[in-house]
Image: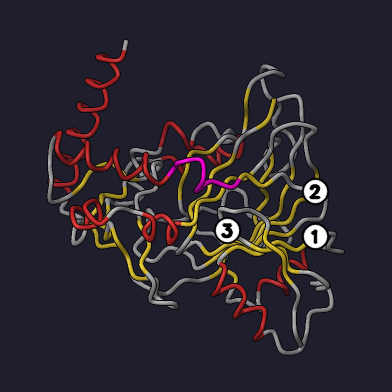
Amino acid sequence: MMTATKPISSAGGVEVLGIDLSAPPKDAGELVELFDQHGLLLFREQPMTKAVLLAASRMFGEPLVHLLGHNNDREVPEVAVVSTRGRDGDIEAKDPDELVGRIEWHTDQAYTPSPNRATMMWAVELPPEGGETGFVDREKVYEAMPASLRDRIDGLHVVQSWRKAQAEIAKNPNYATDEGAKMLQLDRFPDLSYELVQRHPVTGRKVVHAPPMWSSAIVELPGDEGTALLDEVMAFSLQPHFVYWHRYRPNDVVLWDNWRFMHAASGTKGRYRRLMYRTVLKGGAVMGVPLDPAESEAAEKRYRAAMQSARAEAV
C-alpha cells in the first residue's frame, strides 16, 4: 500500500488521501509510519460513528478512558464529548456573543507524569464561525531555535501546574456542571517537573516543552530570570509561521502526536453549537516528576507575582 498525502500547512501536518477509517487496512503499519513522520494527520469526509472512531484509534495505540471523566460519553466511555453545550447538550451560554470553548495552548494531560501519546478528534457539528483547533509542531520549534537559546534551556526543567490553569480550564462549558466542577480542585494533581527540552520517546527527536497553559516556572531559575526565559521560549514557539489553525469540515478526523504538538481551541460564540468526539491514546513514557510541595508552591507564587508585576507595568 502506497498511501498518498498532501501537506495541510507550511507549519506541518499532512492530509491522508484515499483512506476510509470505517474500513481500515488490515496492515496499518504505513499509517503509523506516516503518523510518526508527520505527527499530524487529517482524514477528510469520513463515515464515522463513535464505534468507528474508537476502532480507528486502536490502529495507533490503546484508547484510554480519560481520567477526569466529566465529559466521557455515557455509552462509550473511551470517547469524550467536546461540546459548547456540555456533555449532555443542556448548557447554554449566558450571552449569545460570549466566546465559549476557548482553550489556551497546551498539551493534553501534562499535569500527569505520563501524558497521553496522541489525540484523535472527529468533527460532528460545526459553528459557522470560530471553532478552529490550532497546532504548533514543537519539533520544528526546536530545530529553528537559535543555538544561543538552545544552550540556555538545555538541561532545565519547567513546572507543569494544574493550579496555574484553573482560570482557563473553568471557562470550558464541560466544567459548568456539578460533576465538572469537582474536577477543578486545586490539589487534584501535584505540580510536576518536566524537561524543557525533551527527546520524543518514539522518534528520538528533540521537542521544546513549554505549553503556556501549564508552564508556570523554571525549576533551576527562580524569580524574574526564569520567568523571562520561559516567556521568551513561549513567544518564540508561537510565532505565526509555527502556527496552523485547522478550520474543520463536517466529518474531518484529525490525529495529532501529543508528545510533539501542542494545540489550542479558538472558541466560538455562545449562540453556536460545536460538537466533537475525541479519543486519547495511552502514552506510557514517564515525563514528569512530582515536585516537593513547598518548592512547587514557592515557584508558583514567584510566577504569579512576576505576572502581576508585568501586567501592572503594561497598564
- The foreground one among 246 and 21 is 246
Compare marks 3 and 2 and give the one earlier in the sequence.
3
**Which quadrant would the C terminus be assigned to in this image?**
top left
Q: Residue at 38%, 76% (x, y): give it.
A: 204
**Other-residue count near label 3 (Cα within 10 Å), few / some / many at <14 / 14–19 / ≥20:** many
Where does residue 293 sit, x and y in percent of width and height?
17, 49
Which of the 4 quarters of the picture holds residue 41?
bottom right
- Closest to the camera, between mark 3 and mark 1, is 3
Query: Relative to 41, does residue 309 appear above or below in the rendering?
Result: above
Q: Disc 1 vs disc 2: Cβ atoms closer than 8 Å?
A: yes
Helix, strand or loop under label 1? loop
User: Along the horizontal axis of the image, is 271 left or right of 167?
Assistant: right
What's the CA distance linking mark 1 and mark 2? 8 Å
| Label 1 vs 2, first from the N-terminus | 1
Q: Mark 1 points at which residue?
A: 44
Q: Which residue is drawn at 34% across and 38% down?
A: 164
Residue with the mark numbered 3 = 12
Circle 3: residue type = Gly
Front residue of 255 and 236: 236
Q: Nearer the viewer, residue 104 or 188?
A: 104
Whether residues under marks 3 and 1 lie with C-beta atoms below 8 angstroms apart, the answer is: no
Instruction: Report whether 279 appears left or right of 157.
Output: right
Whole-angstrom CA distance, mark 3 to mark 1, is: 17 Å
**Amino acid under label 2?**
Arg
Per the rendered image, the range of residues in magenta is: 238-244
Question: How far is the residue under mark 3 from the one under mark 2?
Answer: 19 Å
Relative image position of residue 303 (x, y in whole percent): 22, 34
Give the vertical position of 194 relative to 311 (above or below).
Answer: below
Residue type beneath disc 1: Arg
Q: Is residue 214 left or right of residue 127?
A: left
Precedes in sequence: disc 3 or disc 1: 3
Q: Residue 249 carries which label?
A: 2
